Image (tube, rainbow, N blue to C red):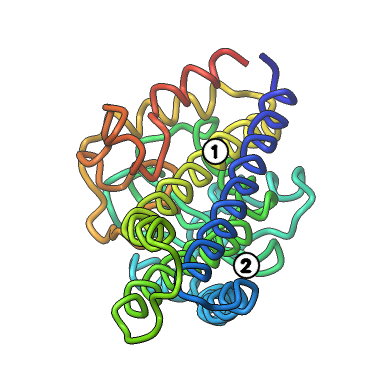
Amino acid sequence: MNLYSEVSRNVRKTWIILGLFIIFLSAIAYVYASASGYNTSLYLLFAATLSTIMSISSYYFSDKIVLATSGAKPVTKESHAELFNVLENLSIGSGIPMPKLYLIHDSSPNAFATGRDPEHAVVAVTTGLLEKLTRTELEGVLAHELSHIKNFDIRLMAVVAVIVGSIAFLADVYLRSMWAKGNRKGSGVLLLAGLVLSLLSPIIATVMQLAISRKREFLADASGALLTRYPDGLASALEKIAADKKPLDKANNATAHLYISNPFKNKAGTHLFTSLFNTHPPIEERIRILRSM
C-alpha cells in the first residue's frame, strides 16, 4: 500500500456510498409518492428544497456555532509561535490559505477543522494536544486537519446532510399523510413498503452518513501523511490520543464527528452493529493503515 493508492481508494469509496445514498433517496421518494398518490418529482423536489435551505444556513454559520460550543479561543503568533509556524508551513505545503487558529483549554488531546471552504476555515487544538505531542506528531495532526479543509469534507458533509434531512422529512410527511383521509391511494404492498421505509429509512440514512464520515477520516489520514511524507508521525499521535482516556469536557453529539478522534472516548463501539453508528473508524485500524504505508 502507498499514500497515493490509499487516497484514491478512499475517494472512490466515498463517491460509491454517496451514489448509493442518492439512489436510496430516489427510491424512497418513489415509494412514498406512489403509496400516497403524489407526483414523485414534486414530492422529492419539495423535500430537497426545504432541507437545502436549512443546510445552507448551517453551512454558513456552523463554524461560529462549533467554536462557541467548544469554548475555543483565537491564537496569535506571539502567544503560540511553534504551533502557528507548524500550521503556517503545512498550509504553504498544501497550497491553501492558512486557516484561523484556535485553542481549547482542555487536557484531553484532540483537534478539529471546520469552515465552508479553504478561504473560510478554522483549525482548533486542545491544550492537552500541545502538551502531550512532539512537534512531528503535532505536524501529523495538523496535516490531517488541513486535509479535511483541502478535500472539502465540510462541503461534502453539508451535501450529505441535505440528503439525510430530505429522507427524514419524506418519512415524516409519509407517516402523517398515510393517516389522513383520501391519501392512502396506493396498493397494499406499496402502503406496507412505505410504512416500513418510513420507520427504517432515517436509521439507514444516518448509518450511510456516518459511513461517509468514517471514509473521510481515512482519506484525511492518507492525505495528511502525503503532505508530511511521514505517516508514522500521525500514527504515533493517534496512539497517544487513544491512550488518553479523559473525554473532552465540552464535546457534544452535534460536533463529535469533527474531531480527529472520538471526543467521548468511552463511547466507541467495536461490535459490528455498534460500530455502524460510530462517528470515527477504529483508531487501531487507522494506525495500522498508516504504519503500512
Q: Which of 89 and 191 lies nearest the eye of the viewer?
A: 191
Q: Where is residue 214 in the image (x, y as percent from the top left)?
A: 48, 40
Residue drawn at (51%, 76%) of the image: 37
Q: Which of 250 and 270 lies nearest the eye of the viewer?
A: 270
Pair 2/1: label in front: 1
Q: Which of 105 and 71 lies nearest the eye of the viewer?
A: 71
- Going by the numbered disc 2, the residue's amino acid type is Arg
Residue drawn at (56%, 47%) of the image: 145
Look at the numbered discs 2 and 1 and tell me whether their residues touch, using CB distance below 8 Å.
no
Crowd band around label 1 with a 10 angstrom C-alpha radius: few (<14), some (14–19), many (20+): many
Crowd band around label 2 with a 10 angstrom C-alpha radius: few (<14), some (14–19), many (20+): many
Residue drawn at (62%, 31%) of the image: 222
Instruction: Answer left or right for 179 relative to 5.
Output: left
Q: Position of residue 264 (x, y in %)?
A: 25, 47
Q: Which of 243 and 220 lies nearest the eye of the viewer?
A: 220
Q: Quadrant of the N terminus?
A: top right
Q: Position of residue 94 (x, y in %)?
A: 75, 45
The residue that label 2 is drawn on is: 116
Q: Position of residue 289 (x, y in %)?
A: 53, 19
The residue that label 1 is drawn on is: 215
